[in-house]
Amino acid sequence: MLTNAVIHEILSRRSVRSYQPELISEEEMESLITAAQYAPSAMGRQDRHFTVVTNAELLCEIQKASDGEPFYDAPAAVIVSVPPENAYGLEDAACAIMNLMTAAHSMGISTCYIGSATGTKKTEIMRKLQIPEGYVPAASVIIGYAKEAPDEPAPRRADSVTWIK
Ligand SMILES: Cc1cc2nc3c(=O)[nH]c(=O)nc-3n(C[C@H](O)[C@H](O)[C@H](O)COP(=O)(O)O)c2cc1C
C-alpha cells in the first residue's frame, strides 16, 4: 500500500471523548471551519451552516437538553445545520465534519463526531445558537485537546471490500 502524510492522518485519527478545558485558538478554529467549507456538497450548493460554540454555559445547556452527555465536556463544538429540504443534508454535514476532523488531527487537535446531541434541535436552543431561518441542526463535532492519548485504531474488517476486476 502507498502512503503519504494525508493518509497517515486519516489512518491514525481517533474519536476522543475526554477533553482538557483549554480552547484551541480562533486561528486554528478558522482553519478547521475552512477545511469543513471545502468539503464536497451535493450539487456544489454548500447548503450547510456551521455554528461554532465555545460558550461553556450554552454547551452545558445543550448537554442537559440531550439524552446522556453528548459533548463529553469538550470546550468547543461545531454544529452543522442543513435545510430539511436538502435531500443530501446529512451527507453534506458528514463530509464537512470529516474534513474538519482530518484537518484537526493533522494539527494535534482532537475531535469526535456527535450525532446524538438532540438538544441542538430544541427551539429555544436553536434560537440561542442563531441557527439561520430554514436550517435545522443535523450533526455536531466536538473539538479540543485530549486528556490522554487515545488507543490505536481498531483493525479494519477484512470482509468489507469487494474488487471486481
Ligand atoms: C454519523 C456518526 C455519528 C456519531 N455519533 C456519535 C455520538 O453521538 N457520540 C459518540 O461518542 N460518538 C459518535 N460517533 C463516533 C463513533 O462512535 C466513532 O467514529 C467510532 O466508534 C469509531 O471510532 P474512531 O472514530 O475512533 O475510529 C459518531 C460517528 C458517526 C460517523
Image (cartoon, rainbow, N blue to C red):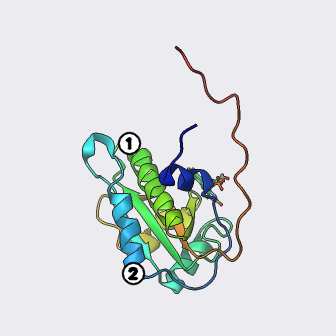
- Name the mark on residue 63: none
Name the spot of residue 121 as percent of width and height, x first. Answer: 47, 63
Q: Quadrant of the N terminus?
A: top right
Q: Nearer the viewer, mark 1 or mark 2?
A: 2
Determine which quarter of the picture holds residue 142.
bottom right
Q: Residue at x 53, y 64 (%)?
A: 105
- Of 164 and 45, which appears nearest the observer? 164
Name the spot of residue 113 as percent of width and height, x first. Answer: 56, 59
What residue would you read off at disc 2?
26
- Name the mark on residue 88: 1
- Of 3 and 104, which appears nearest the observer? 3
Residue type highlighted by circle 1: Tyr
Beta carbon at label 1 within 8 Å of ligand 1: no
- Give the side of residue 49 with respect to residue 57, left or right: left
Name the spot of residue 55 as percent of width and height, x first. Answer: 47, 84
- Give the side of residue 103 with respect to residue 84, left or right: right
- Of 118 and 92, which appears nearest the observer? 92
Q: Residues within 10 Å of mark 2 (few under 14, many from 20)?
A: few
Name the spot of residue 37 as percent of width and height, x first. Answer: 33, 59
- Of 89 and 29, which appears nearest the observer? 29
Q: Residues within 10 Å of mark 1 (few under 14, many from 20)?
A: some
Q: Residue at x 41, y 54 (%)?
A: 96
Q: Residue at x 71, y 36 (%)?
A: 157
8 to 108, vertically: above or below = above
Residue type highlighted by circle 2: Glu
112 to 1, vertically: above or below = below
